Image (cartoon, helix red, strand yellow):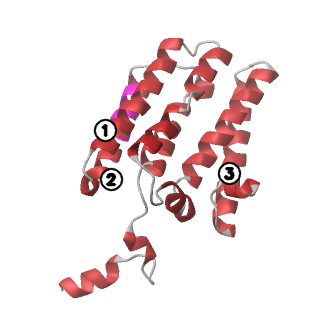
């Protein structure tokens, strides 16, 4: 398995690789700038940018067709998906490196992601997409409305929830494979 297979997914297209690494690099650069603007020490800025590289890139990569096929291949269960969410301990890394990012904020963000993932995986398949959007919407409201985190990390919880609940947990839809790329055009014509 190549590095690209591990970071993106086996069989990723050039476009998926470009979008994934592009989002990773742009996200890391943006957050690096936020960290410098916040007058953080360089080592803190570097770790914050590394977390951003993973979060922004992961939000895009997990939404690609190749990642969907890989993470939702036969034999993958809810336990695998919940494990993927559980290993995302970056909230605690941010609490460790960023003054003003409390352990309570880290625990709340982590618990919100896990509870959202439990909601999505426990929901019947036809309702998982709206459940994931509900979990993400309420999770963003909780983590941005009730918690105070440093401005340099205000992006973190929403991107984490998008990466895990919307991008990772939702399988690829069959409509994405239609020849038109949209899938709904023929269905509309048939219904008319």
Foreground disc of the pair 2, 1: 1
CA–CA distance in space, label 2 to label 3: 25 Å
Residue 20 in view of the camera: yes
As drawn, the residue found furthest toward the left would be: 192
Q: Nearer the viewer, residue 107 or 78?
A: 78
Query: Mark 2 near mark 1, Cβ–Cβ under 8 Å?
Result: no
Q: Decide which of tag 3 and tag 1 comes sooner along the chain.
A: 3
Q: Is residue 164 one of those drawn in magenta?
A: no
Percent coordinates x, y for residue 80 in the rendering = 47, 43
Foreground disc of the pair 2, 3: 3
Left or right: where does residue 172 sit relative to residue 18?
left
- Residue 31's place in the image compared with 77, above or below, is above
* Residue 91 - label: none
* Residue 129 - label: 2
- Magenta-drawn stretch, dominant element (helix, strand or loop): helix
Callout 2 crowding tier (Cα within 10 Å): few <14, some 14–19, many ≥20: some
Instruction: Please give the residue where the numbered disc 3 appears in the rendered image.
Output: 7
Query: Which element carries disc 3, helix, strand or loop?
Result: helix
As drawn, the residue found furthest toward the right would be: 42
Instruction: Please give the residue where the numbered disc 1 appears in the rendered image.
Output: 119
The image quadrant of residue 136 is top left
Percent coordinates x, y for residue 190 in the rendering = 22, 87
Q: Nearer the viewer, residue 45 or 124?
A: 124
Q: How many marks?
A: 3
Query: Residue at point 62% right, 22% down?
Result: 94
Query: Which element carries disc 1, helix, strand or loop?
Result: helix
Q: Check the picture and name the quadrant holding the C terminus.
A: bottom left
Query: Residue at point 54% right, 13% down?
Result: 102
CA–CA distance in space, label 3 to label 1: 27 Å
Which stretch is magenta? 136-142
């Amino acid at each position: 398995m190549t590095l690209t297979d591990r970071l993106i997914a086996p069989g990723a297209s050039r476009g998926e690789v470009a979008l994934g690494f592009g989002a990773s690099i742009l996200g890391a650069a943006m957050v690096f700038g936020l960290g410098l603007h916040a007058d953080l020490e360089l080592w803190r800025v570097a770790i914050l940018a590394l977390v951003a590289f993973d979060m922004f890139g992961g939000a895009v990569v997990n939404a690609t067709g190749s990642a969907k096929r890989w993470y939702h291949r036969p034999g993958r269960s809810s336990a695998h998906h919940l494990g993927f969410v559980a290993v995302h301990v970056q909230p605690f890394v941010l609490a460790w490196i960023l003054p003003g990012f409390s352990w309570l904020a880290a625990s709340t963000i982590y618990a919100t992601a896990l509870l959202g993932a439990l909601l999505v995986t426990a929901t019947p398949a036809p309702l998982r997409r709206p459940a994931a959007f509900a979990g993400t919407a309420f999770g963003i409201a909780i983590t941005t409305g009730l918690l105070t985190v440093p401005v340099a990390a205000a992006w973190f919880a929403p991107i984490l929830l998008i990466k895990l609940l919307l991008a990772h947990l939702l399988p690829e839809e069959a409509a994405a494979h239609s020849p038109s790329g949209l899938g709904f055009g023929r269905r509309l014509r048939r219904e008319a």
